[in-house]
Amino acid sequence: MEIKEAQEKLKEMYLQKDKDRGVFATFTWFTEEVGELAEALLSGEKNKIEEELADVIAWAISIANLENIDVEEALRKKYNL
């Protein structure tokens, strides 16, 4: 799956909830997921790391959607991809 496709699917699924919650509350959820990723990394359990990494990416994309940022374009600009 392309990043753009994932971003669109997450937008369809969660944008209204994210708008209702607001960007700062959404960011709070994102930071909680980063903490869970840290715990997973400490555990060394690959399946937990994979799951929490997916959550972190999904919440980061939710923030991008709230801010009308194209994630692929942002990556291209930042890292010359």
Image: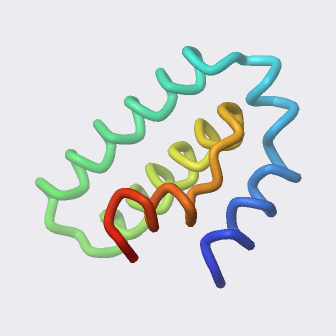
Residue 45 in the image, given as x and y percentages of width and height: 23, 69
Of the pair 36 and 13, the residue shown nearer to us: 13
Question: Is 64 situated above or below 2?
Answer: above
The location of residue 34, given as percent across then percent down, is 33, 41
Q: Residue at x 69, y 69 (%)?
A: 4
The spot of residue 58 in percent (x, y) is 57, 53
**Image side of residue 54 versus residue 5, left or right:** left
Vertical placement of residue 25 versus 68, above or below: above
Callout count: 0
Q: Quadrant of residue 49?
A: bottom left
Question: In the image, what residue occupies the spot 15% across and 66% down?
Answer: 44
Observer-nearest of 65 and 32: 65
Image coords of residue 12 (percent x, y): 88, 52
Say which residue appears at 69% left-offset and 17% top-offset. Answer: 22
* 54 sits to left or right of 45: right
Quarter placement of the N terminus: bottom right
> In the rendered image of this protein, does residue 37 appear above or below residue 32?
below
In the drawing, does residue 1 fall left or right of residue 38? right
Is 72 displayed left or right of 39 in the figure? right
Q: Nearer the viewer, residue 45 or 4?
A: 4
Q: Is residue 75 above or below residue 62?
A: below
